[in-house]
Amino acid sequence: MTSTLPPHLGASALDRALAAFVGELGPESVVSEPEELRAYRDPYTYSESDEFDASAVVMPTTTEQVQAVVRIANEHRVPLWMFSQGRNNTYGGSAPRLRGSVLVNLRRMNRILEIDRDLAYAVVEPGVRWFDLFDGLQEAGGDLWPSIPDLGWGSVVGNSLEYGIGYTPYGDHARNICGMEVVLPDGSLLRTGMGAMEGNAAFHTYPHSYGPSFGGLFQQSNLGIVTSVGWWVMRRPEAYSACWARFRGYDTLGEVVDVLRRLMLDRVIENTPLLNRGVEIDADGNFSLDPDGEGWSARFALYGRAGLVDAQFAVVEQALRAAPGVEVVRRTFDTADLTGPANHDERVQRGIPDMDLLDPRMLPYGEVTGHLDFSPIGPCRGADVVRLEKLVRATYARHGRQYVNGLYLTPRSALHISTTFYDPRDEEQTRGVFEGYADLVREVATLGYAPYRTNLQHMDLVAEQFGFADHAQRRVAERIKDALDPNGVLAPGKSGIWPAAYRR
Ligand SMILES: Cc1cc2nc3c(=O)[nH]c(=O)nc-3n(C[C@H](O)[C@H](O)[C@H](O)COP(=O)(O)OP(=O)(O)OC[C@H]3O[C@@H](n4cnc5c(N)ncnc54)[C@H](O)[C@@H]3O)c2cc1C
């Protein structure tokens, strides 16, 4: 049925594999009609491009079915590409790196397997979305809050495996993973960490292992299909204050970054502060765009016992106001009140998912608007942040492109995300945006920076930047890949790691 073939595979070989998938999963769980496959394209590449088209989609519902899919792929040498919700928009959506791959769509594996209220963790399958986790935690009593990214439709597993970020004190999502179950490229099953011991009671509570820890091998990787993870959440605090600072100019930006870093290192601020240029905020926390683009806003939040939050705010206010022209405001919420915050910033730092950032009214081309995010990471030091900001700004200016930026701070690193918007129905415009991205990668590399995550088009280019000791990292990754996946069936090309068959 399908008109897209992977390299090295003829139509009849693919048909035999698809028949085997149907035999194992049933016809309702295998899609190969070209019209239906279009829904799995990356929504932000040129809309008529077939460069990253899949040949089929399989939709297992159990770990055993995932194992069967992987075994069939090995038998027929079919490349697979896995996703959990497949909402990895701006980094490829659900589309595969290698054209003609069969997508392993895990959306139907969407059970919350466990919620432990004492130890504050959940165990989730890959299809569990932020909306589902939030609802599940509410139904379990509402005394646990998830950290969430900006859009609620993505999956806990996919986002966390990609090192995604959220905005409560548990915002480094990869670190919330504790104990995974993984289908390896030969179809066998591995449990990481303490889960390697049958029935180990600390599987989802102790993050390390006896001996080497393998969990990291499966993040941003093509070495396994994760079928469940333990994921840590926070206890509902007594008080929650959403806070903003506003200021103008690059000099003050540097000072504010340094102040925020110290407050984070001292654990006064424990969530992920977000700084935006070109945004004005009034005393009630309402936003408007600053026409000359020199205005900055910083968003962060405080959590804990009510008296402690008040004391922390006093410390933060005093520290930030020491920088020239900085104003600080906050709004405090009753944490038991679910209807609480009305605006996105207040909700997302409180773990309440929404879809506000995809509101077509805010986007220049309506709901089809393409976003290309450029996400280099560097140290959280004022002078470094300002230097990278200026370079990114100058590069966009050279390309004649508008962008919005966000600086996401952790105590030691700063993630600079700049987003440019375009019309993916316009081939030339879209091509220009992607070429501009390659230029940004090369420019920031001159200062010693690289993206932490990237789109399908640029996975090889970004991997190229990690060249220490004649690409030791890539060579090690390839050796592990070839040892675990000799037939090269799992996600060839993911993060620039190609199996032997495709390297030749
Ligand atoms: C407006 C906007 C706002 C955004 N805000 C944020 C944000 O605040 N924070 C953030 O982190 N991102 C953000 N993103 C980026 C992205 O959309 C989200 O991270 C999204 O959650 C990723 O989609 P997903 O969770 O469905 O992951 P998926 O698409 O399911 O997975 C992503 C990748 O992980 C791997 N993977 C997934 N599942 C498995 C598995 N079971 N086993 C092995 N490998 C697997 C695959 O390589 C897959 O391509 C934003 C994007 C946009 C457009």
Image (cartoon, helix red, strand yellow):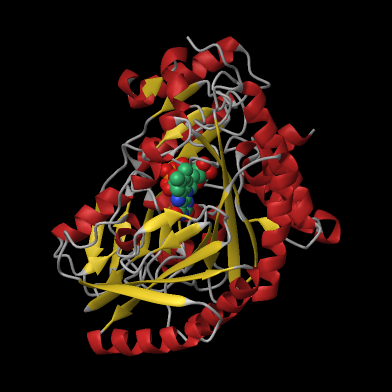
Name the image quarter holding the C terminus.
top right
Up/down of 46 relative to 273, above or below: above
**With 383 as the anchor, is 409 left or right in this view?**
left
| Residue at left offset 67%, top offset 36% | 434
So how many labels did they put on this image? 0
Quarter of the rendering containing residue 10: top right
| Residue at left offset 48%, top offset 84% | 321
Residue 26 at least partly seen: yes
Q: Position of residue 464 (x, y in %)?
A: 77, 48
**With 338 as the anchor, is 356 left or right in this view?**
right
Q: Position of residue 181 (x, y in %)?
A: 41, 54
Up/down of 447 relative to 330, above or below: above
Up/down of 186 relative to 218, above or below: above
Q: Position of residue 173 (x, y in %)?
A: 44, 61
**With 86 as the anchor, is 308 left or right in this view?**
left
Residue nearer the viewer, 255 or 48: 255
Q: Position of residue 142 (x, y in %)?
A: 17, 65
Residue 183 at least partly seen: no
Up/down of 387 relative to 38, above or below: below
Residue nearer the viewer, 283 or 233: 283
Residue nearer the viewer, 198 or 136: 136
Residue nearer the viewer, 85 or 7: 85
**Which residue is most to the right?**
470
